[in-house]
Amino acid sequence: MATAYWRPDDESAADHAQSDLGASASVSFWKAGHAPTLVAAFLYFDLAFMVWVLLGPLAPEISKTLGLTPAQKGLMVAVPTLAGALLRVVNGLLVDRIGPKRSGAINQIIVILGLFTAWTMGVSSFGGTLALGVILGFAGASFAVALPLASRWYPPEHQGKAMGLAGMGNSGTVFAALFAPTLAKMFGWNAVLGLACIPLVAVLAIYLAIAKDAPNPPAPRKFVDYAALLKQADAWWLMAFYAVTFGGFVGLAASLPIYFTDQFGLSTVVAGYCTAGCVFAGSLVRPMGGALADRIGGVKALMMVYAAAVIALVGVSQAPSLAAALALFVLAMLALGTGNGSVFQLVPQRFQAEIGVMTGLVGMAGGIGGFYLASSLGLAKQFTGSFAPGFLIFAGLAVVALASVAMVKARWRATWKTGARI
């Protein structure tokens, strides 16, 4: 059975780090950690992400029922992203104190009860959608649980793959886009909230049965230690980079159903299919992004990612047809999904001992990026009549991120001594 790796919390952990690294170098990925926990982390993350973005595919139907403006639609789909971002910090603290398994179970129960209550009582106002969005934020906060749950079982040279496979739970957004519009047409959009509880309960049972916390976890940190992380420039850089990669991914996942229905007049079901195709591309490559970063280094991978994202987002702002928009969104999602895996290849190389809270901080930044993109697209549509300004501004943020990676790469490679590529 593998043990938790490289926790320089004390001298004994540091002394054992080199021997652990040497022993694990010859061990294959599938034997280096705990596969059932990796599967549980993926399933939990997958279903949590499905319900986290649920309001996006339902937004066109909800908008018809409640008479929402473009700005209100944008805010409605953005609130779960912001709530999830803030709650990720809370989860990061909780993981270090009671362990990722119990933290995940608490979050799942809150989401199930919230959806069940919304289904039975009904959601009949814009304010009600915002309240539901806050509850769905607990699903988005799963990020700060699932990744440490999986990561703590694996040594540094396998971090990219482990984080990437667990993080491929992003694919849950595909299920929301595929099935929510069809189910809403058949049973009404409010019924979808109740139907979502069924797979959530099933996955909770599996999670409780097979997930295990890694042995010898890092000692819980004091609150002052968490605040100290925000005094380190590297923490802010990693947060900023993830705000663009994950923020772009989840912001688009939540907003594309609205974009396709408003921009091209598609039905909600067809818009869901188009969204699912784009989101699937970004979800599929997340583990590939981690593996790529393991091979060539997270810095080089990120520079490639941001360059591709800029091209795609600028192109989308001027897309003349549905086919062109789809091709460019797929490119954007491929780039951003790869970037998500690449950032989380870097995080444990620099902050392995604080992986729980750093996952929460970095995940929070990603959620804030998603909130900004989703809400800004709604505002751009309402006040300019076009989504283009929202896409162009986010492309500008990707340019800034690219320049920033180029600026810090030399220092990171010189000062991070981890045994893995940076």
Image (spheres, rainbow, N blue to C red):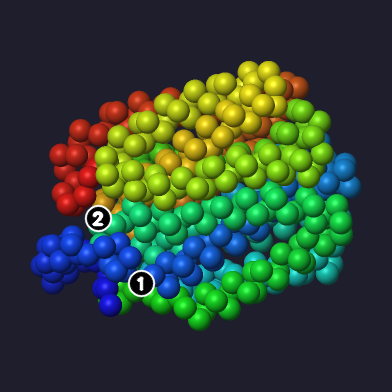
Q: Position of residue 308 (x, y in %)?
A: 45, 28
Please tell me in which quadrant of the rendered image residue 110 appears: bottom right
* Residue that numbered label 1 is attached to: 34
Q: Nearer the viewer, residue 225 or 214?
A: 214
Please tell me in which quadrant of the rendered image residue 24 appears: bottom left
Say whether residue 123 is visible.
Answer: no
Residue at left offset 82%, top offset 54%: 184
Residue type at mark 1? His
Residue 157 marker: 2
Residue at left offset 38%, top offset 75%: 213
Say whether residue 364 is visible.
Answer: yes
Quarter placement of the C terminus: top left
Q: Secondary structure at mark 1?
A: loop
Q: Secondary structure at mark 2?
A: helix
In this rendering, would 250 be left or right of 365?
right
Quarter placement of the N terminus: bottom left
Residue 290 marker: none
Instruction: Reply above or below: 181 against 404.
Output: below
Residue at left offset 57%, top offset 69%: 107
Residue at left offset 28%, top offset 28%: 407
Q: Position of residue 256 (x, y in %)?
A: 67, 38
Q: Position of residue 218 (x, y in %)?
A: 29, 70
Residue type at mark 2? Glu
Please tell me in which quadrant of the rendered image residue 192 appears: bottom right
